[in-house]
Image (cartoon, rainbow, N blue to C red):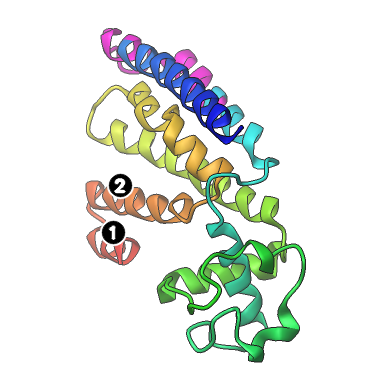
Amino acid sequence: TDITSTHLFLFQFLVLNALYFFVVYLVFKRPHQPGRSRGLLLVLFLFAVFFRLCLVGSTPQLSSDMYRYVWDGRVQSQGINPYMHPPSSDSLASLRDKAIYPHINRKSFPTIYPAGAQIFFLATHKLVGDSIRGLKAVFVLFDVLTMIVLIALLRTYGLQETRFVVYAWNPLVILEISHSGHLEGFSVFLVVLAFFLYSIDKKTLGVLSLA
């Protein structure tokens, strides 16, 4: 039943979070030795990437937002403004299919995503087309870049680089980006990049990244 599936998911998520907090505890408990934690850093990073790759091929179950991302990219690729017509509009009837359109939520409403997101949807649609897995792979790529920038940010402030695990191994982050394919995979990267650019006194670029 749905209740049993929900309970199983919550139990698995609870176990993963318990393991996650245990690893975070071990990392923070470890004495900070600059330049002597590269082996541990590499292991943590590789596992973080592995966790994400395991979910790229899965079909989103908890959210249907990805289908709207693909739809908005498809609409724009035809030279149509996604703010003008909702997916259910007769004007877009020729763009409907059986793979993307049926899974879009709130078909009677135009898109709510801002212009920056729309540029991203168009660019990724030109790159991976209507592929849900392809779009998730793009999000995972940016999420991996986020981890790299986080490591650089920690290094800039003289903090323990392995603390990037607080983000990198977070089950919620991994699930929402690698499985559900949420836009935060891209937007969080821009925010973290803005912090890093500010930390190295590239304030103008940092403001642009944040904007």
Q: CA distance from mark 1 to mark 2?
A: 8 Å
Q: In the rendered view, does 131 fall on the left or right side of 117? A: right
Image coordinates of residue 17 in percent, x first then y, are 41, 21
User: Circle 1 is placed at which residue position?
Assistant: 206
Q: Are marks 1 and 2 in contact (CB under 8 Å)?
A: yes
Image coordinates of residue 187 in percent, x first then y, are 41, 56
Q: Amino acid at mark 1?
A: Gly
Q: Secondary structure at mark 1?
A: helix
Say if the magenta span includes residue 27: yes
The residue under the point 46% across, 54% down is: 186
Image coordinates of residue 147 in percent, x first then y, are 44, 37
The residue under the point 48% across, 77% down is: 109
Q: Main secondary structure of the magenta part?
A: helix
Local crowd size for mark 2, using a 10 Å CA cut-off: few (<14), some (14–19), many (≥20): many
User: Circle 2 is placed at which residue position?
Assistant: 196
From the viewer's side, name the closer residue of 13 and 199.
13
Q: Amino acid at mark 2?
A: Phe
